[in-house]
Image (cartoon, helix red, strand yellow):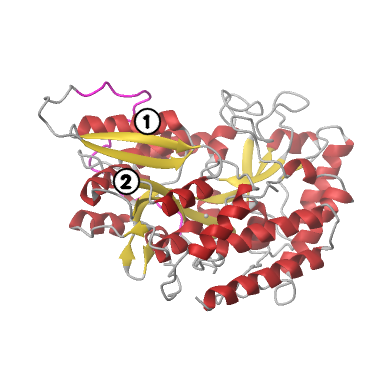
Amino acid sequence: MATSFSMSRLPRRRMLGLTLGAGALLAGCGAPATPTPAPAKPIEAPKPAAPAATKPAAAPTSAPAAAKPAAATAPVTALKLLGWTYEPPLVRENLDRFENQNPGFKVEYEPVAGDYLEKLLTNFRAKTPMDVIYVRDQYHASWVESGFLQPLDETDDVNALYKDMFPYNANQMQWKGKKYGLPYYTDFDVFSYNEKMVNDAGFDSPPKTLDDVRKYAEAMKKKGISDFPIYMDLAKGSDAMWDYWMYTFASGGHLLDKDGEPTYPDKDKVPQAILEWWVAAANDWQILNAKANMEPLPSGALTAMRSQGTQPGYGTAAFMAHSRYDLEGDNAPERSKAAIPGKINIKFVLFPGLEANSPHNVPAWNRYYGIPATAKDKKASMELIKYLGGKDKSGQYYTAKRWWLLRALGMAYQSPWADAEVQEKTKKFIADPALMQQQNSLGQARDGLEFPWWTDWYMDLQANIQVALLKQKTPREALTASANKARALKKEWEKK
């Protein structure tokens, strides 16, 4: 049984200071447009139950035919959906099907290019009309506390949907006893590796510790397999540099305690040890191109795991921490130069830690569809949310299942995992489903998401990590500066 994660209860505070600060800070920090998991108790991997009695409708691969025009006198409800830029054509196909099933609705979809947080904060301040929006877990607390989101109508069907969710996901969309959304997708992070590159470097199994990662990477560099075998996301942005969470969690560390106090650099030694390892990897061992990795990946560009390496089946990097869903694209020949037809070449291992007995924990997260305070017709917004984040008119989890079948975005609901098509899809890019369940069970929410000042603190932390990687500060100096910033932000918010 998955264990629930409850947010801390904070007094309601206005967001003006934070939004202005975040907006100014974000203006100079571009975040990659990836889609985008206080420590939470572990979530449990989806376990297949008895096969579903009714087989869900097959996922279409192209946009359905347009609905027949409504009569001239029939009213049409116009809705506007805003989301970050991830597979806009597939989103549009989902919306076309919603309009087919609901002829009285017309949905305008705006995929936001660039920094999603900055765009949404601007819209909130300007009271720009929006009807449904994508929400990341790190925005949830501050947006609710600031009055930017309104709670869902807790109808019987909404409550039934929440009962079918994994508790972790259900709790991530609630605040002070109210429900604020239905799930877009959920996932967790993995440490992926290119099996061919590992084997050609002389190793028959993946690395189990960070010492192993260093040894493997140095061997690859020496043999000319890759100049920089390790890739990390070291960019600044509201949804960037997840690697620091991954590496820290995997070794049992944390960045903030339950009260929002920074654990580093003294209370918890892991964050500094990880940053010291990163600095050495970039500057001493030269197996990580830190400066290059600070640049956000251009839209449409192949990742280091998928771009062409020195020979077929190689990527430019052999090791990369990323979302579980990325493994599907990593192993798709039409989307990855490192993919090997008929074989799963990009695999994952329990996330390596500093020690052999490290816990291998990883970040997990939730993304959901929410209703902004500016929505003009809450009842209409609810209809779209229930379709995208719940069931369609036929009673199927159509959208959630379709995202899994086409792009391997994780489903927050328990029952669809028993579906035969879902299980067959999993086998195509996950070599060891049991290992996937084990890593999933070690997922945790990132520390401090319940604090409205979280984003400002996190982006300051990113800036200090970059400075340390460039050897302009020692790891301890960088983390001390970040810890001081966290305390200042916390104190500022406590006065409001």
Left of 276 or right of it: where is 419?
Answer: left
Q: What residue is rendered at 63% in x and 64% in y?
A: 359
Instruction: Give the amino acid type for the residue marked by disc 1 in the picture.
Output: Arg
Label 1 to label 2: alpha-carbon separation:
16 Å
In screen coordinates, is 236 left or right of 419? right
Q: Residues within 10 Å of mark 1 (few under 14, many from 20)?
A: some
- Residue 91 found in image quarter: top left
The residue tagged 1 is 92
Q: Earlier in the sequence, mark 1 or mark 2?
A: 1
- Say which quarter of the image contains residue 250: bottom right
Residue 328 position in % (x across, y down): 53, 35
Q: Secondary structure at mark 1?
A: helix
Question: The N terminus lies in which quarter of the figure?
Answer: bottom left
When the figure is inspected, residue 460 is found, relative to residue 347, above or below; the finding is: below
- Which residue is rendered at x = 64% and y = 73% of the image? 488
Going by the numbered disc 2, the residue's amino acid type is Asp
Dominant secondary structure, magenta:
loop
Q: Which residues are magenta?
A: 44-67
The residue indicated by pointer 2 is: 131
The residue lying at 81 percent from left, 44 percent from top is 217
**Residue 47 included in the magenta stretch of the image:** yes
